[in-house]
Image: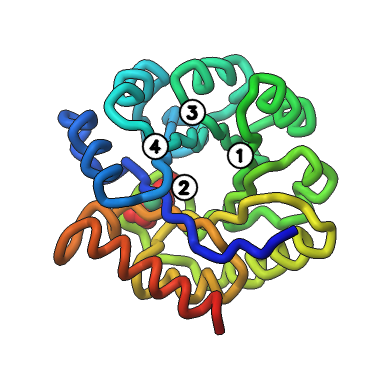
Amino acid sequence: MAEQVSPMLVASVLPADFADLGRQVEEIEKAGVDRIQWDVMDGRFVPNMTFGPDVIAACRRHVDMGFEAHLMVVDPDPMLERWVEAGCEIVIVHAEATTHLHRTLSRIRDLGAGAGVALNPATPLSAVENVLDLVDLLLVMTVNPGFGGQSYIASMEPKIAQARAEIDRRGLDIELEVDGGIGAATIGAAARAGARVFCAGSALLNGPGTMTQRAEEMRNAALAEMAA
Ligand code: DX5
């Protein structure tokens, strides 16, 4: 399996202006970001609530870029098809949020979407070792989910490295993504640990310069460590 040569940048819309999402996603696309992450929260799995499939569907027609749904919800199974119908090419569930993860991942693939699984900071990689053959994207959380603007948890780097080693050892075609506190100052360490897909909200949507410049700076910081 070919080593991914360039880092993928995913924009979380969590820090976006929810009163102006159509224009915000257009701005993200213009900045050359690779994919958008929709942080779906139900107020139970995490102490916050965001948006449903209809909001994602409304933004779908504004851009051509890929969408991933990050379901920070308990029991995601009843609504899996809604996220795909809304225009998400990848649906990410939390290993901690579903009773039958093998069945859930299989169902996401049956719906024609990429199957993603996310691990909270306290959840070991072993929680998904028996279903990696059903996984297209593994999301290692580098914050406790629920809010943007939190600090990167560097102690997740051994888990990232362990995931990278396991994916490579088994020759699996799995995107290894990190999410939480990712910015120019932290993306290099996550890349050095083995991540190749980087989800950023606060550091990408806000900050000095333009979003294009911030995206470029983050990509270069990741590339420098990937090449090291
Ligand atoms: C946590 C969210 C955030 C978001 C990115 O529940 O998933 O990690 O995507 O937020 P920043 O980049 O601001 O940490």
Q: Which residue is drawn at the image coordinates 62% and 51% (left, top)?
A: 175
- The answer to which quarter of the image holds residue 86 is top left
Residue 88: assigned label:
3
Kind of element beneath mark 2: loop
Q: Depth-wise, is mark 1 or mark 4 nearer the camera?
A: 4
Residue occupied by mark 1:
94
36 to 8, vertically: above or below: above
82 to 162, vertically: above or below: above
Q: Depth-wise, is mark 3 or mark 4 nearer the camera?
A: 4
The answer to whether marks 3 and 4 mark residues whose Cβ atoms lie closer than 8 Å is no
Q: In the rendered structure, which disc, 4 or 2, sits on the residue that comes first in sequence?
A: 4
The amino acid sitting under disc 4 is Met
In-front residue for pair 86/148: 86
How far across and how far down the image is residue 124, in percent? Answer: 71, 57
Q: In the rendered structure, which disc, 3 or 4, sits on the residue that comes first in sequence?
A: 4
Which corner quadrant holds the C terminus? bottom right
The answer to whether marks 4 and 2 mark residues whose Cβ atoms lie closer than 8 Å is no
How far across and how far down the image is residue 127, in percent? Answer: 76, 49
The answer to whether marks 3 and 1 mark residues whose Cβ atoms lie closer than 8 Å is no
Question: Coloured how?
Answer: rainbow
How far across and how far down the image is residue 161, in percent? Answer: 67, 70
